[in-house]
Image: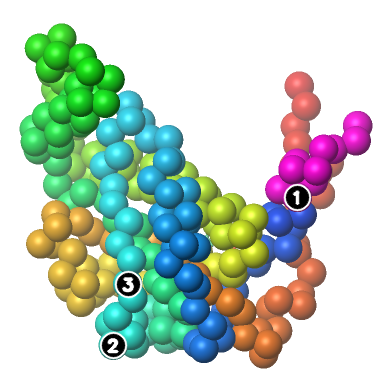
């Protein structure tokens, strides 16, 4: 079947993206590009639409530099134009559900009283999970946001590197994430590759479709 232009572009973008190891520190993304990337994350689907996550944008060069030591020496976090850190809520409380219901009420013009049952259901079922289950559940959703951000970068011709290779506790301290009730989960430097990044030339390694797709 012949693919339409947009679908072709989408797949080509995914083929050409790669985990960039060396960024050109002199090439900066524009505020408009950053806004579009933020929007791609903000629009991420989340369980019940609760969005128990936030996106932190690190623009401060000194802070980016400090983070290298807590990223196992990975210099992408300093050299990239911008560093995104995807964070989950550190702890959950009834206010999270109250705020979500208020958003629905304002956006859809529904009286909050009509949403009371929904609020109680969400609050009771989620707050009754233990801390670890809550964390795992929130973090799974952060990986969906990561996918959206990587794809948005790819289609916009922006280089990126998904990173789990850092020490969350130290990122939280340096970026003072606790004051926002946040804890870091993933770091994603974005910008443009350095001409010296040899990873850009390597062929993409993926399982063959035969060894990947199970048709039943
Ligand atoms: C969740 C996640 C964490 C990763 N952490 C790192 C990391 O800390 N540093 C790094 O250089 N690459 C990291 N990568 C990149 C992967 O190694 C890379 O995506 C994989 O080898 C496939 O290569 P490609 O993305 O270039 O196609 C990570 C990727 C994912 C999805």
Query: For the residue labelled by badge 2, is the local secondary structure a helix, a strand or a loop?
Result: helix
- In the image, the residue with mark 1 has its CB under 8 Å from the nearest atom of ligand 1: no
Whether residue 55 sits left or right of residue 151 in the image: it is left
- Magenta: main secondary structure equals helix
Q: How many C-alpha atoms fall within 10 Å of the one at disc 3: few (<14), some, or many (≥20)?
A: some
**Is residue 187 something that shows in the picture?**
no
Quarter residue 199 falls in: bottom right
Query: For the residue labelled by badge 3, is the local secondary structure a helix, a strand or a loop?
Result: strand
Quadrant into which the C terminus falls: top right
Q: If you read the primary sequence from the N terminus, does the residue marked by circle 1 or circle 2 appear first?
A: 1
The x, y position of residue 65, in whole percent, is 34, 87
Where is 90 relative to 193, above or below? above
Q: Are the residues flagged by discs 3 and 1 in contact, CB closer than 8 Å?
A: no
Residue annotated with mark 1: 9
Q: How many C-alpha atoms fall within 10 Å of the one at disc 1: few (<14), some, or many (≥20)?
A: some
Residue annotated with mark 3: 58
Whether residue 121 sits left or right of residue 18 in the image: it is left
Q: Quadrant of ligand 1?
A: bottom right
Residue 62, labelled with which disc? 2
The x, y position of residue 106, in whole percent, is 20, 26
**Is residue 86 something that shows in the picture?**
yes
Task: Say if the magenta span includes residue 27.
Answer: no
Q: Which residues are magenta?
A: 1-11
Q: If you read the primary sequence from the N terminus, does the residue marked by circle 3 or circle 1 appear first?
A: 1
Query: For the residue labelled by badge 1, is the local secondary structure a helix, a strand or a loop?
Result: helix
Disc 3 from disc 2: Cα separation: 10 Å
Where is 78 relative to 82, above or below? below
The front one of 37 and 89 is 37
Whether residue 112 sits left or right of residue 36 in the image: it is left
Q: Residue at 47% x, 85% y: name it.
A: 79
């Amino acid at each position: 079947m012949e693919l339409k232009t947009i679908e072709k572009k989408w797949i080509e973008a995914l083929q050409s993206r790669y985990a960039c190891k060396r960024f050109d520190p002199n090439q900066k993304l524009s505020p408009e590009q950053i806004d579009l990337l933020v929007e791609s994350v903000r629009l991420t689907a989340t369980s019940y639409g609760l969005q128990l996550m936030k996106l932190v944008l690190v623009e401060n060069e000194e802070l980016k530099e400090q983070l290298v030591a807590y990223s196992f020496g990975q210099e992408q976090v300093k050299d990239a134009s911008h560093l995104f850190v995807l964070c989950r809520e550190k702890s959950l409380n009834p206010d999270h559900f109250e705020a979500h219901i208020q958003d629905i009420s304002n956006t859809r013009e529904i009286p909050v009283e009509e949403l009371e049952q929904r609020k109680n259901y969400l609050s009771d079922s989620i707050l009754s999970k233990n801390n670890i289950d809550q964390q795992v559940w929130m973090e799974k959703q952060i990986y969906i946001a990561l996918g959206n951000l990587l794809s948005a970068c790819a289609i916009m011709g922006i280089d990126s590197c998904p990173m789990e290779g850092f020490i969350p506790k130290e990122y939280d301290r340096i970026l003072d994430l606790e004051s926002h009730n946040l804890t870091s989960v993933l770091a994603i430097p974005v910008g443009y590759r350095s001409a010296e990044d040899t990873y850009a030339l390597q062929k993409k390694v993926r399982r063959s479709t035969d060894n990947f797709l199970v048709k039943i």
